[in-house]
Image (cartoon, coloured by chain):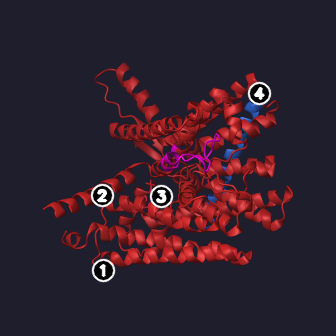
Chain colours: A blue, B red
Amino acid sequence: MMDHRKNEFRGFAVEVFGVMAYLALLFLAAVFFQ
Amino acid sequence: MKTEKMVQSYEIIFYYTGYIILGMAFLMVIPIVTALAFAEWNPLCDFIISMSVTTLVGLGMIFIGRRTHREKAYVQWKHGLVVASLSWLLLMLLCAIPYSMSGHTESYLDACFDVMSGFTTTGLVLTQDLDHLSNALNMWRHMLTFVGGQGMVVLALTFMVKERNGAYLYKFYVGEAKDIELVPNVKGTARIIWKISMLYLAVGTAALWVDGMFIGLKPVSAFLNALYMFESSWSTGGFAPMTQNIMYYHSLSYEIITMVIFTLGSFNFGLHYAVWKGDRRELTRNIETKSFFLTSVSACLLTLLWFSKQNLYPDAVSRFRRIIFNILSAHTTTGLGSVYARQFALEWGNFGVLIMVVVMLIGGSACSTAGGFKGLRVGVIAKGICCEIKKLLSSERNLKVYKFHYIKDQVLSDSLVRSSALIIICYIMLFSVGTLIGTFCGYPAADSAFEAASVTGNVGLSIGITAPSIPLVLKLYDIIAMYLGRLEFISVFALVGFAGGGLKKQCEKLAG
């Protein structure tokens, strides 16, 4: 049960930080085209 | 077979549609509680009347179809499709009652427009004086878009119909364009979808709440704004409690949090589930995430390149907030806008508007809260074209089976490519009709195309056409396009076919 919860939490964190990294990449593109 | 003869199709359809309507009637308790909490007595009366009417209609329909339960009638595919499409239509009419009674809409049709816009997670608005809506009505608007995004038919049936044989629920599920099985049990699948959404609801609302207080909102107002903006972003809806939409908050952090939420909301629930189960590679292997990444990055880069010639948004932060925010909002079919509607027409130029039209039509992921063609279909068609070229260039004796990854490895069959192409053609036809109607009504072609793409893809961004004063034909087209776009055509065609077949039978009876 604990492993299951841990997996879910990790999955959630991976999704959120993955999207934030993607947005950071787009921000870098905005800096590049400035 | 004997049972099928005894219980008529309309009884089965009425029975399940009645349950869905009853489910929505129960949901009206939330705006009623909100009205009580904020001592809003007129909205309280509006919602009590609306709830009573909706409950009566729901119970009446269950009563008409009561033999379905008694005789254990077999639910066919046509029933599932018709129940999904019929319930969306009836709920549009019933859920519009509190809108209409509030006095914020010019006509009942405008109220229906807003409800359909909410259900389909489009986000276009005809309700007037948004800044002075009651808390109860604001709660209702954002709840509709949240529930519509997750799938209200599935929600109602999952929690209200006792499981006899779970397999039949899948037929309603497909009717609502959410044909995914996360676990073999359909009820289990729906519960996983709601679990994912509720967890994000808690975290996303908390993040926006704290940020709201940080930017100067009072705690209660910050909480309500956070809840509304989460519901709107996660369901890729685009509604906001204020006329200025996301610009009301004047906050980069608020915009970044909503961007994270609506990007996550546009992902397939199957993808969320796979990642949560521990399969993190799914994020990079899935054909939809690949397709979304490629199209969104290309659109952002092209638009940034275009604006670098215009020198309109001079610094990187304003480019991120004005260009990338709007491109992602359009691509995920959210519809939150960080520029005023007319700025698209006056500042973005033809190239910028064209990019927006393309990304609005492509849309988000299948089995998510997003609209549009969906990344899956775009990916399948692109892969199909590549495979056709490979086949032409390889030896005739080469019988290679081509595959793609979508939750699991799947064969790229001709039938899958054909069905994807057919749905995309339907979307393009609907978009073309909308553009034609817009130009016929006297609007410029680029503006008409923008607005047609927005309704067809269930986006909600406007270039300034959508207003209570638009011609009746455009309002009707918008309602139909939002409905067809959301349910992905098939179940609506089934409803039209079913109604047409019933009408033909009645005519034959009368004639013979």
CB atoms of marks 4 and 3 within 8 Å: no
> Which span of residues is magenta-colored?
B456-477
Residue B241: image location, x then y, percent? 71, 58
Host chain of mark 1: B
- Using residue B402 as the reference point, say whether residue B217 is left or right of it: right
Residue B208 visible in the picture:
yes
**Distance of label 2 from label 1 (alpha carbons):** 24 Å
| Quarter of the figure with residue B118 | bottom right
Going by the numbered disc 2, the residue's amino acid type is Phe
Q: Residue at x 46, y 67 (%)?
A: B187
* Residue underneath mark 4: A32
* Same subunit, tags 3 and 2: yes
**Distance of label 2 from label 4 (alpha carbons):** 56 Å
* Same subunit, tags 4 and 3: no
Going by the numbered disc 1, the residue's amino acid type is Arg
CB atoms of marks 1 and 4 within 8 Å: no
Q: Which mark is residue B182?
A: 3
CB atoms of marks 2 and 4 within 8 Å: no
* Residue underneath mark 2: B498
* Residue underneath mark 1: B70
